[in-house]
Amino acid sequence: MYNLLIGLTRGEVGADRLLEYTVDEVRQYIAPAAGKARGEVKVDRLLNLPTLLMPETGFDDEPQIARVGHVTNVNKSRYGYTFTFVPNPAIATIPSPRIEAAAAALDIADGEFHRTHWAVKDVDLYRVLDQEIAARVKPKVFQFPISEPFESDLVAVMMPFNAGFTPVYESMKAGVEAAGMRCLRADDIWERDHILDDVLSLIWRARVVIADLSGKNPNVFYEVGIAHTLGRDTILVAQSMDDIPFDLQGIRALKYLNNGEGRDALTKGIASRLNTITGS
């Protein structure tokens, strides 16, 4: 999924324009409600999504270019919501006509380009960028496996390669399975010559990424950065909140103790969070 912001270059959207042109299933995920009326907007679910920001087309009063990034500081205001858009420096600006040409792949209707609104689309934005628009600055040390399919029930687990984490992984796996999903970590598979390629494949294919930051493992931090860049829903866990670096402290995390009782609590926490993410 991704946020589509059209005409919202000043960082504010009216409440009646939020979730316009959004299909019911996605609307229910972002703003759950028992009936037809929209429920309270789950702001954290908007923050986790990659974002495409562009002006309304057909006007000359501002540059006709789109930017890709993410939103932060989403707050309710008197008339709607305010937000801050943070562009992704790894992705060049995109002329609006190129977005219009890829409208079908991005699930953007013709009328949307001429109406200020915030939609949430059930489309992998980065996959479209790679395959349809090619606006991304390509990584130099690896390549994303863009030909591999997205697996909606797959959870990728990123954690230190250490035997001491095996019981932790088993607890996570129990939580994932309780939520009706399945999980893998890189050492569960050996499909490529380089371990990083297997890690990239897991993150690319996964619906959700779980990252154990315990011990401040630099490999796990690197993998979290990749997951966030790709817009994957990410669950952070740690045995100590001191293991979470400053740049990630604004994201909620599950703290656990590495004993029987603590791992049981981790299993329940993982299952609960996954059910929230998937809307189960």
Image: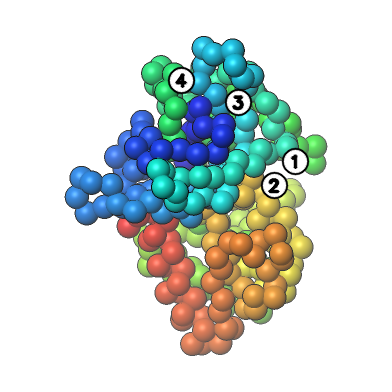
Q: Which residue is mark 2?
A: 197
Instruction: Rate crowding at label 2 as few (under 14), some (14 to 19) or many (20 or more) other CA atoms within 10 Å.
Output: some
Mark 3 and mark 2 lie on one chain; the one further toward the N terminus is 3
Q: Is residue 237 above or below residue 260?
A: above
Q: Position of residue 235 (x, y in %)?
A: 54, 62
Determine the secondary structure under disc 1: loop
Mark 2 is on which residue type? Asp
Q: Nearer the viewer, residue 228 or 146?
A: 228
Which quarter shows the C terminus? bottom left
How many marks overall?
Answer: 4
Q: Looking at this view, is 72 or 209 the one in front?
A: 72
Q: Amino acid at mark 1?
A: Phe
Q: Residue furthest left?
A: 35
Q: Is residue 10 visible?
A: yes
Q: Residue at x 54, y 72 (%)?
A: 254
**Residue topped by disc 4:** 113
Q: Which residue is mark 1?
A: 142
Find out whether the residues at labels 1 and 2 contact each other: C-beta distance under 8 Å: yes
